[in-house]
Image (cartoon, rainbow, N blue to C red):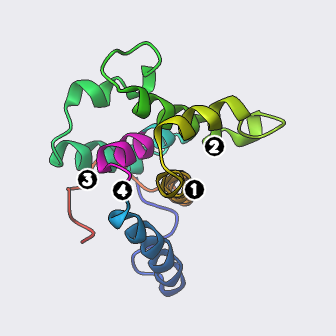
Amino acid sequence: MDARIDLHSNALAGQVLKYVNSAGKALSGSSLPMATQELVKLRASQINGCGFCTDMHFKDAVAAGETPQRLNLVAAWREATVFTEAERAALELAEEGTRIADAAGGVPDEVWANAAKHYTEDELVALISVIAIINTYNRINVIVQQPAGAYEPGMFG
């Protein structure tokens, strides 16, 4: 399987992705736990059917010390006992923010209030930014049919 466009060799794609990457790098200094960021990226990627990002964030999370058990349960987080209440709130916000078109009124107030119980304002900004950025990557990769499976942690720097 080949991607419809080679995003790594196209100059315009390189410019666009440079700015998306910069937004993502700004979050690395936030106080939102990296484990939470990876869980959110994985869940949104699962929902969006992005094989490349699902593969990438599973492998990045494992390389950062996350357990395969927790990662395997991300898709069924509501029934899983391995996530903290804060992580559960982040996963719920990620689902609602990713499925925004499915809800006529957007993210429900209860979902936002639950996340706000667990995270500071800066952490909420980081959380909604992670959700927005991963959804951007998911859409790009799904549209171009970016093949999944060959990612190695750290291969993009």
- Which numbered mark, 1 or 3, is in the foreground of this view? 1
- Element at badge 2? helix
Mark 1 in CB contact with mark 3 (< 8 angstroms)? no
Find disc 2 in the rendering and name its residue.
Answer: 97
Q: Is residue 149 above or below residue 99?
A: below
Write down the quadrant of residue 113 in the picture. Answer: top right
| Residue at x-position 45% and y-position 79% | 18
* Magenta stretch encompasses residue 55: no
- Which numbered mark, 4 or 1, is in the foreground of this view? 4
Q: Would you say residue 47 is visible in this rendering? A: no
Q: Quadrant of the C terminus?
A: bottom left
Mark 3 to mark 4 CA distance (whole Å): 30 Å
Find disc 4 in the rendering and name its residue.
Answer: 31
- Residue 4, percent across and down? 52, 63
Mark 2 to mark 1 CA distance (whole Å): 8 Å
Give the mark, 3 or 4, whose residue is nearer the N terminus. 4
In-image side of 133 versus 109 (left or right):
left
| Residue at x-position 68% and y-position 29% | 110
Find disc 1 in the rendering and name its residue.
Answer: 132
In-image side of 157 versus 123 (left or right):
left
- Residue 31, percent across and down? 36, 56
Give the mark, 2 or 1, whose residue is nearer the N terminus. 2
Find disc 3 in the rendering and name its residue.
Answer: 150
